[in-house]
């Protein structure tokens, strides 16, 4: 059955209550036209959300619910994950407040696993104050990789470019030890499959960045590019894959060469995120590729410095919402087109 657009249920985790997450969520759904595209379920507390909405002088109405089966289609639903009050201090990193961000996120993830929501859009968390005995993950992606099926890959997406990460939240001095042919092949395969199934690109072209400056300059500045990256790309290309590189990241982005490819694989976090945010900040989306469920997030953090000041721009969160819906629809279309029409049930 094809869902009506407003019947696409978008789970929303609230993020750090002392950051800008609640503000960008509420500002996004102030545009009631979005309710023609989806039905949002914000995992949090209706009293807190109502208080924040009032402080922002927003006018959209919200619907408090205590269980997902009370959801009202075409309305902004707030699912009460907890009942008690929370002491909110905008701009302050607080472990107690951080624990509520995780309560929201884990409840939303559970609903995603149970198909109670169709997609998940996560507001920013503070990676330091979320740590506890119950939650020992550096961020959303690692937890989702544990809870959902598949292998997660951080893919930053905008109109201009898509950048995937070979390694994400890993110390720089550990990158070269993690770089292997097997990992490269695995991540390139995830990107290729994502571009085909989730973005509708039938024959994607993927560029791979080098690890070292100038891709090692023939071994003068490190040999990982010559020993691992180049042979792996050569093998994949000879096997029919549209994979190219390695490219030195400075000239690759400076010359706009990235525009010739459907996606780019960066070796580590800042190698991919610095050019991405320079070119797309405020309009980019963090998409978790490679999993059986759809999750997106805005390209910014908690922005404690402007929290509570009505200065947060909701554009990136809005783009994350749009992308989640687009990927959900594209993935369903792809599955419909590629299913075996001759397959029948055995008696």
Image (tube, grey):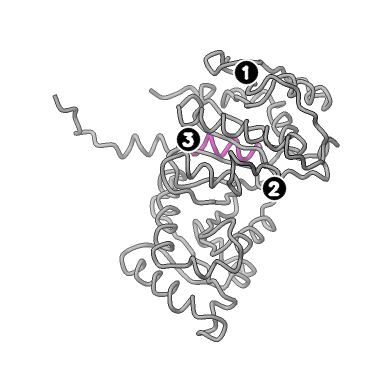
Nearest-to-viewer mark from 2 and 3: 2
Among the two numbered marks 2 and 3 on one chain, the one whose residue lies closer to the N terminus: 2
Q: For this view, does 335 lie left or right of residue 329?
A: left
Mark 2–mark 3 distance (CA, rounded to whole Å): 31 Å
Name the secondary structure under disc 2: loop
Asked if residue 324 is among those painted magenta in the image, a careful observer would answer yes
In the image, residue 120 above or below residue 264: above
Q: Earlier in the sequence, mark 2 or mark 1?
A: 1
Instruction: Find the magenta span and give its range.
Output: 318-328
What residue appears at the point 77 percent right and 45 percent down from the top-left corner? 303
Left or right: where does residue 275 sit relative to residue 207?
right
Q: Residues within 10 Å of mark 2 (few under 14, many from 20)?
A: some
Q: Residue at x 43, y 62 (%)?
A: 183
The answer to whether 98 is drawn above or below residue 265 in the figure is: above
User: Is 270 or 180 nearer to us in this picture?
Assistant: 180
Closest to the observer: 229 or 67? 67
Tag 3: Cα neighbours inside 10 Å, few (<14), some, or many (≥20)? Answer: many
Give x and y (percent) for residue 337.
33, 37
Magenta span: helix, strand or loop, mainly?
helix
Residue 128's label in the rendered image is 2
Q: Are marks 2 and 1 in contact (CB under 8 Å)?
A: no
For mark 3, what is the residue? 328
The x, y position of residue 93, in whole percent, is 77, 42
The residue pinned by badge 1 equals 75
Quarter of the image that includes the N terminus: top left
User: Residue drawn 80% across and 31% down?
Assistant: 88
- Pick whichever, 12 or 39, lies toward us: 12
- The extreme left residue here reads 347
Image x and y of residue 266, in percent: 54, 63
Image coordinates of residue 53 in percent, x first then y, are: 78, 24
Q: Secondary structure at mark 1?
A: loop
């Amino acid at each position: 059955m094809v869902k009506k657009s407003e019947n696409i249920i978008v789970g929303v985790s609230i993020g750090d209550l002392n950051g800008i997450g609640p503000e960008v969520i509420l500002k996004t759904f102030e545009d009631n036209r979005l309710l023609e595209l989806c039905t949002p379920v914000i995992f949090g507390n209706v009293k807190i959300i109502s208080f924040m909405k009032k402080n922002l002088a927003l006018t959209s109405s919200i619907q408090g619910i205590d269980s997902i089966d009370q959801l009202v289609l075409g309305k902004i639903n707030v699912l009460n994950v907890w009942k008690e009050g929370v002491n909110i201090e905008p701009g302050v990193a607080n472990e107690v407040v951080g624990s509520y961000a995780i309560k929201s996120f884990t409840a939303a993830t559970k609903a995603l696993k149970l198909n109670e929501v169709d997609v998940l859009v996560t507001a920013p968390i503070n990676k330091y104050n979320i740590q506890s005995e119950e939650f020992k993950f550096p961020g959303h992606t690692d937890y989702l990789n544990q809870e959902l099926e598949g292998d997660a890959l951080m893919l930053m997406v905008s109109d201009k470019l898509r950048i995937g990460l070979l390694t994400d939240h890993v110390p720089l001095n550990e990158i070269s030890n993690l770089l292997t042919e097997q990992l490269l092949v695995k991540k390139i395969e995830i990107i290729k499959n994502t571009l085909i199934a989730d973005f509708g690109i039938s024959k994607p072209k993927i560029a791979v960045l080098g690890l070292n400056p100038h891709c090692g300059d023939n071994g003068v500045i490190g040999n990982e590019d010559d020993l691992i990256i180049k042979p792996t790309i050569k093998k994949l290309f000879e096997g029919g894959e549209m994979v190219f590189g390695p490219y030195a990241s400075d000239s690759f982005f400076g010359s706009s060469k990235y525009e010739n490819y459907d996606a780019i694989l960066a070796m580590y976090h800042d190698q991919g995120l610095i050019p991405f945010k320079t070119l797309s900040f405020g309009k980019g989306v963090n998409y978790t590729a490679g999993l059986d469920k759809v999750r997106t997030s805005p390209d910014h953090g908690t922005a404690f410095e402007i929290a509570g000041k009505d200065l947060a721009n909701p554009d990136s969160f809005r783009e994350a919402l749009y992308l989640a819906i687009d990927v959900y629809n594209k993935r369903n279309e792809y599955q419909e087109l590629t299913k075996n029409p001759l397959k029948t049930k055995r008696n």
